[in-house]
Each structure stands twice: as C-alpha cells, then as structure tokens.
Amino acid sequence: MGSLKEIRGRIDSVTSTQQITSAMKMVSVSKLRKAQNAIIGLRPYSEKLTEMIGNLLNAGVATNDVWFRQQEQAPKILIVAIASNRGLCGAFNMNVAKKVELMLATDYKEAYENGNVKIITAGKQLGTSLKYKHIPVLENWDELSDNHVFEKFIEKVNHLLSDFRAEKFNRVVLVYNQFVNALRQNLMEEQFLPIVQLKTETKKSQKSEKNYAQLPVEFIYEPSKEMILQEVVPKMLRIQLYKAFLDSSAAEHGARMTAMHQASDNAAELLKELKMNYNKARQMAITNELLEIVSGSAGLE
C-alpha cells in the first residue's frame, strides 16, 4: 500500500482513463450504428447478384470466362488483407495478421517461399504488424479503411481485375473480419478469384407448401445469357470487395465498443479497490497521529 499522495495520484489517473474509454465507447456505438446499417443494406443486393449469376450458370451458360477459369499452372496468389487504421479494438487487427501469417506458413508455404505470394493490406495497424514480422507488402490501401465511398473502390478493383486478367495473379484471396453483431466477428478467408462456386437458395412458395405441382421456371434473357454474365460478374466482384470492407468496418467498431466497455468496467473495479486502499491508509494515518498525541501527552505528565 502506497502513501496517500501516491494513491490519490493513481485514482486521478484511472478516473481520467475511465472517462476516455467511456467517451471512445460512445463514439464507437455511434459509428457502429452507421456501419451496421450500411452492411445490412448492401447484403441483399449482393445476395441477389450472386443468385442471378447462379441462375445463369444453372441455365447452361458456358463458364469459359477468365473469372471462372481454374489455373493449372503454378499458383500466383494475391492476398488482400483488410483491418483497421487504428488500434484499441482488442484482437481485431492481430487476428487478421495472425491469419495471414498462418496462411503463409501452411497452405501457401511453397508458393510464398518461391516468391509467388503477394500481399495487399488495408489498415495501418495490419501493415505495421506484418512489417514487424518481416512479411513484405506489395501495396497499401489504408485510405479505403476509413473512406467507404464506393467510387473510391472502383479504381482499386478495376486495377485488381486487370492484373488478374493479365495473369499477374491466378488466385485472389480476401482475409477480413465479417460482422455478425456488436459482440461477435468471424475471421474470414474467402477466395475472391477465380469464382469457384455460387450458392443459390430456392425459396419454397406457398403453393409448394400446399403440395401443388411445381412447374419449371424458365426465364427469358435479353440480351443473351453470355452478354448478361459478362456484364454482371465484374459488378458482383466489385460489390463483393466493397462488402468485405463494410463488414470489416462494422466489425471494427463493434470490437472497439466491446474493448472500451471492458476497459471502463476494469477501471471501475480498479477505482473501487484504490478508494478502499485510500480509506485504509487514511484511517491508519489518523490512528498514528492519535497515538503520537496520546504518547506526547503521557510524556508531558
């Protein structure tokens, strides 16, 4: 137990920290609401695009396009890892960095040792972590971690798609935190290119529930199915990458809100303990002063 002055200093310091963490929590709550609305609003559009392409593929459209072509040559892999420009959000950034490091040590070990794995990072904290581990980074998209204007993504995505078409890479993988709710984020490793499989779900109609016979649905496509596929697939890829950034943004604010909430609770517990120690020290000091007075009085007698 320290002196009264030392304990008072610690109480003031912890109180100041608690005020900061509480303020950061409130800011994250406000930003989370906005980011959550953005990703929830985009998901149905992204799912509908995926469903449309799935219907075209099920209709027998040839998938000889470059976006679907599986390369048989040696893999040339591009990893796009998405995190945050700021910290104080728990293990949010570290989880992405550890995931990239694990991928390089396991699935992509041979390609990485041969120099066939390149990494693009979005988020200063992630770039710093990989640099500290001596993992080279091809490019930084740090400005996209905070500025979620769709037009800003088009240039980056178009450049990425051009490199893939030019066979600079034959596989593109996304690593990011998917937003589930304010308390939970799923760390995702998602193959972006080439497109391997599109999941389409067929919803049962009310007639099917009444055991009516189901007639096959045939769509009339105008212009041709192939032309529609060529137009829609690049749009879907742009939306998919944009969705990954919105997911990461919402997950970041959720993780920071949770971290600041826990920090505020820890500060409250620490303040309670410090105030108890302060009261004990003050009582001890008063008792010692009384003993000195009594002893002095006894000495005068």
Image (cartoon, rainbow, N blue to C red):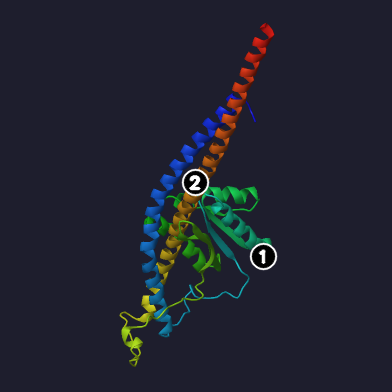
Q: Is residue 270 above or below residue 284?
A: below
Q: Is residue 207 above or below residue 86?
A: below
Q: Is residue 86 above or below residue 64?
A: above
Q: Amino acid at mark 1?
A: Thr
Point out the residue furthest to the top here.
Answer: 300
Asked if the residues shown at circle 2 and circle 1 are in contact, with their CB atoms under 8 angstroms apart, the answer is no
**Which quadrant of the view contains residue 39?**
bottom left
**Reading the chain from its start, which is encountered first: label 2 or label 1?**
1
Inspect this view and state whether residue 17 appears: yes
Q: Is residue 1 left or right of residue 233?
A: right
Q: Residue at 43% of width from left, 60% of height from top?
A: 242
Disc 1: which residue: 106
Q: Amino acid at mark 2?
A: Met
Mark 2 Cα-neighbour bin, 10 Å: few <14, some 14–19, many ≥20: many
Which of 137 and 267 lies nearest the eye of the viewer? 267
Disc 2: which residue: 260
Q: How many discs mark residues in the rendered view?
A: 2
Q: Position of residue 50 (x, y in %)?
A: 41, 73
Work out which quarter of the rendered image holds the C terminus and state it: top right
Q: Residue at 67% of width from left, 11% of height from top?
A: 298
Which of 6 and 164 lies nearest the eye of the viewer? 6
Q: Is residue 205 left or right of residue 189?
A: left
Q: Position of residue 293 (x, y in %)?
A: 63, 14
Q: Residue at 37% of width from left, 77% of height from top?
A: 227
